[in-house]
Amino acid sequence: MRKEFLSIAAVSVGLFAGLGLTIPLARGDAKPRTISVDEIKDGMKGYGLTVFKGTEPERFDVEVVGVLRNFRPSQELILIKTPHPRLNVTKNVRGMSGSPIYLDGRLAGAYAYSWSSFQVEPVAGVTPIAPMLAEMRRPIPPGFWPLEGGAPLPASSAKAAGTKHASNGAPGNGTTAFDGAPGTYDVESHATQVATRLSAGLDPSRPVVPTATPLMLAGMSDRSIALVRKLFAPMGLEPVQAGSGGGSGTDDPNAPKRYVDGGGVGVQMARGDVSFMGLGTVTHVEGTKLCGFGHPMMEAGVTALPTAIGRVHWIFASDQHSSKIGEAARPLGALVQDRQSAIVVDETKSAPVFPLNVEIRGADGIPKKNWNVEIAEERFMSSGLVASVLGSIIDASVSERRDVTWKLKSKVSVRGHGTIELEDFGVATGGMPDAGELAHSKVARAVGEVLNNPWELTRLEKIETTLFVDYTRDLWKLRGLDVLDPVVDAGQVARVRVHLVPYAGPATTKILEVRMPNELAGKDVDLEVVPGYQVVPDLAAPQNLADLLANSARQSVTPRSLVLQFRARSQGVAYKGHVADRLPAFALDALRPSSTDVAPDAFPSYVRTIVPLDRYVEGSDRAKIKVRPIVR
Amino acid sequence: MLAILRIDSSNLLSFARTTLAAGLVLAPLFVTGDAGAVGTRTFVLDTLDKMSGGDLKGVSVSSDGTVRAGFTLGSAPIPDATTVFAATTLTDGSTLIGTSPNGKVYKAVGDTITLFGDTGALAVTSIVQAKNGTIYAATIPDGKIFKLSQGKADVFATLPDASHVWALTRDKNGTGLFAATGPEGKVFHVEANGSSSVYFRSTEPHLVSLALADNGDLYAGSSGKGQLYKITGPGRATVFGDMPGEEVKAIAVGKDNAVWVISNEYGEPPEPPKRSAAAGRVPAGPSAAPKGKPGKGQLHRFDAQGRMERMMKHDDTHYMALSLDDKGAPYVGTGAGGRVYTVDDAHAVTIVADTDERQVGALHVSGGKGFVATSDPPVLRRILGRGGPDAVWTSKVLDATLRARFGTVSWRSSGPVEVSFRTGGTGVPDATWSGWSNPITGPAPINATARYVQVRARFSRDPNATLAEVTVPFVTDNVRPVITEVNATAKAGPTKEPVKEVPASGAEPPKRDSVVKVTWKVDNPDSDPLRYRIAFKREGQAQWRDALKADEVHTKTELDWETSALPEGKYRVRVEASDEAANPPDQVLKHALESDTVVVDNTPPRIETLTLAGRRLRARVVDGTSPIVRFEIAIDGRTDWRPLAPADGVFDTSDESVDADVSVVVPPGSHIVVVRAFDAAGNAVSRDIEAK
């Protein structure tokens, strides 16, 4: 079994208080007194700070058992025992990552690594403080936060300054970037890429691993948690059901106003009616900045995610691995660096988030019709979070094991590009789609596409979604078709009769017509009847984000329709938003030069008749007819 | 006398097209002291195809192969475009050029190109200037006509149900427009205020060309079935011409009311790549889709009485542009090769411009001036005049196929023409070639040894000079012909080819034929005419004997060798190739090769014994040379031959016995039993015996 060395968070003040020990709440505005690794010897004793319950750190004893040299590149690891009544039970605890460890009264580092699961004694690895402080003092690239205290990257100034995207870095770069062509975004592929990057070069059998950061999930359904676990667990982010606390937007007046050494710190990826927060411990506060965790969260480098002061409810003890459970007590600052040895939070920063508002229609009597969530803008996380949040809302509101026809109409506002409208829809037997299915929805994909687009830096401003549900199986099944005119004169209309069968009720027929052009005289023509949602209109390949967004909203003809179509003899071309269909031969030849490959793309032309219907259609069919030349 | 071979320069090895031309230009022969063959051959460039095989910068080539100074063209590359769809000369003398794929219109003043208007469309397909000076541009794919002025492109009209506007022309008043459109094949009349109405509705998918006659008749050409319509009023039209091909690309009406039409015929375009489900979301990469082949173009003229006459055709290119000059002479721009042709009343076709670009997108010729606007890549080439220092005819690289000595280059000309030549060892001239020789104005020896030669001519001294019939004699090294393979098989016998399948059991016996087919292959690098000598000898003998008559000159690579007069046995055939027909005796080179053995067997086998005891037939058959392959029996003169097996089960030797119960074949009673036997050469013998 794979062993893990878990990063561990702070020790409960309460427990130590019970033992009669008190410590001052550290909040340094000056440089701390530190002890270097070279000065640390086996058997040295000291203490650590972490929150066992509430928001105040408590003290726990530590004893050095050794130092691992070059544990990571240019980084040592101090091994300690933590003899403490509670920790003797819990062993290592997820969420204690970052708990400061003091030796000889000086700050030695952060409780950060553990050995495997099923640990039988409380031994942990400590990341030395020196590299953590170095990361905390590491400058942010100029222009990354154009407005002090504000969110990074107002699109205009970012463009003007030619700077990188705060959460994304340069387009196409970064640990959390999606490596794929625009238009092919898929959050599960993205998760695999990110997990691969984070584990690249690491021996999977290594005994010492960073402690997983517990993800405090509130307001999320089990099915959504399953998606979250699937996407985030390979990165060391372990979902734990919790509460949303002050993260919902209403601050707890009793919550601390500032971060303190050993206090809880949460990275809030979603907050509001649904919340999603990674919980760890502050190692050291210096001015308005702090370092914590003692290991990376996603090793994203310069980043911008909202943070909050964490409140711990309890440490769940588990033979496999124990974990803190907690919530946000007060939103404060932003995660600005996510590095190998530490995360760095700046209290004065405000990370970009976008509101996701969901309204539910058609489900009478549900307890909550409007949901509001703020989601952190991050290349990888945002898309999965949108799907998870939507899945949770659906599960909480309209999850019933009966047939349902649903439609998700979303308005996605993108800075500088206005609002695009997307429509996801479906007919499901046995209940609504879950978060896993919604991960492939147009709206979730659009979020990933926008944040990972290779053309420009932009921001999601808001997403407004309306979910329409109708507890019927609103579906026609295509039973088959009759060719009414097996031979038709060129220039005349060919007709087919389609037989449509509903789930319950009488079957019906419809006659579809399409005109046979003269150019097909003497030819056999293959007619095809397909549902409208399967017909992808001819679109020009996107040249920029605006094109991509415009095309995203036009990925099918009328979804509730039947399309009668056939291949025309001619071809068309598409280029830079233009679609020129059914071209004469000279034009097709002229538009496709041989001296350059940057030219319009050819595509086969189709002649289509679109017949709107009151329901979605399932199934397709084909028929052949003959077009007769007119000689009379 | 030595014959001088006149060889089609486009295919030196094509002896089938070789003709004797003893009276042609005689160049002095280079006497070589070593291996040089004396078979002098000559490159003769004397037709349009041969004279236009190289580079034609600033020269024209007519269909009789005469080269003249042609259009001297300027060169002004057009930015941010790949294709020129339309160009027109404005009243101020400047030129407007409509391009794709960015729908921009450029203005050219001299060779200075500036952006005039950006329609934002995919392509600007036609530009016209109204009588009042307003400029209109037709575009695809949204059916829009723009009104252009410097730096501005405003939508003037959007034609209903028309995606593509292919052509514009002014109406008779000069204020309104006619617009030819697709994909529903309509002509719209567009008023000066931008309102439009359908003027003519065809049954074709596209109307792509328009021209207005002085009398107000409107001609429109279609893409689909290649119809040429004459439209005399709203909705009043007749098919003026049913043109060959699918497309009437351009129409021009001359002052004599002659209507000129270019039409094209295309094959099926290559299938475009299948679109993925992510089409429209994935950015395009380098286009790997196959490009179409050029079509075939034809130019027709309708005289004032409407009689159609084909004036020119090309099977290797379709036509893209048509212009009539002041005298009514047609100029046609091609869709492949970037050439401009003209043709006179006698159907003499002349290349007047040969550009480096793929297509001629638009063309205007007037008073010896005008422009050729090319595509792929787009370049505006102004017609600067005729001749001049840049008017250079350069032949294609002429390949002697072997190292050769080149003789005196000569030509026919009127007026002074400066000719130069160069030689080299690579098919494409490079730094290893000799430099161009000093210009010569009369025949002069090349005096060089190389495989390739190239000739060029300048017309700078006299723009009216002509050049025709350029000849370059050469003598290649004499190289030995080598026989690479000799096959000799009985004409009716089994083939020497490897047997791929087991032959059918009890197959028909071989047919006898005394003719042995001898074939051979020869490697003849210098293409000398070869004479073959064929000899044979019996296996075991030393003496080769001629298979040909003493005075027979055999030049084919096969021989039907009659063997009926030869004793049977195994023979070998030897073929000797000699280039003595092209070389003096002391330089003749020969090579000979023998065949495998071939069996000559013209005598039938013998039935040594034949007995029939009851219905038990016993026989022994013997042949002198070949194995016995079949023994058959029939009765009473019927032809229902039934095979019998040999006593040892396999027909494999020339001495076989048969011992068989023939009661199934010979019923009780008295019958005449006939048996016959075949050897492997097909010789047969028969005997009869009476059955009681």
Image (cartoon, coloured by chain):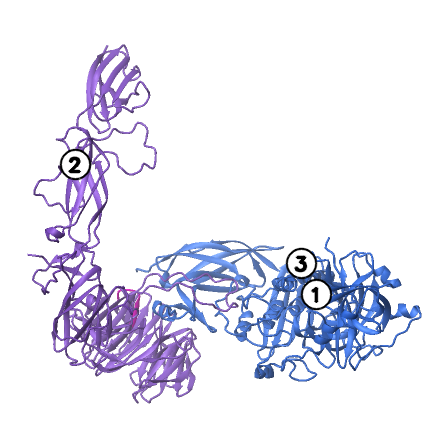
**Mark number displayed over residue B437:** none
Question: Helix, strand, or loop for circle 3?
Answer: loop
Identify residue type, mark 2.
Phe
Q: Where residue B231 sits in the image (x, y, percent)?
A: 28, 75
Q: Quadrant of residue A264?
A: bottom right
Q: Chain of mark 1?
A: A
Q: Which residue is mark 2?
A: B536
Which residue is label 3 attached to? A203
Which residue is label 1 attached to?
A: A70
Residue located farthest toward the left when viewing the structure as drawn: B1
Q: Are marks 2 and 3 in contact (CB under 8 Å)?
A: no
Q: Which chain is blue?
A: A
Residue A5 on image: x %, y %? 75, 61
B248 part of magenta stretch? yes
Q: Residue at x 8, y 57 (%)?
A: B2
Identify by letter the chain in purple.
Answer: B
From mark 2 to mark 1, how far is it between C-alphas? 91 Å
Q: CA distance from mark 2 to mark 3?
A: 81 Å
Tell me the magenta residue range.
B243-249
Q: CA distance from mark 1 to mark 3?
A: 15 Å
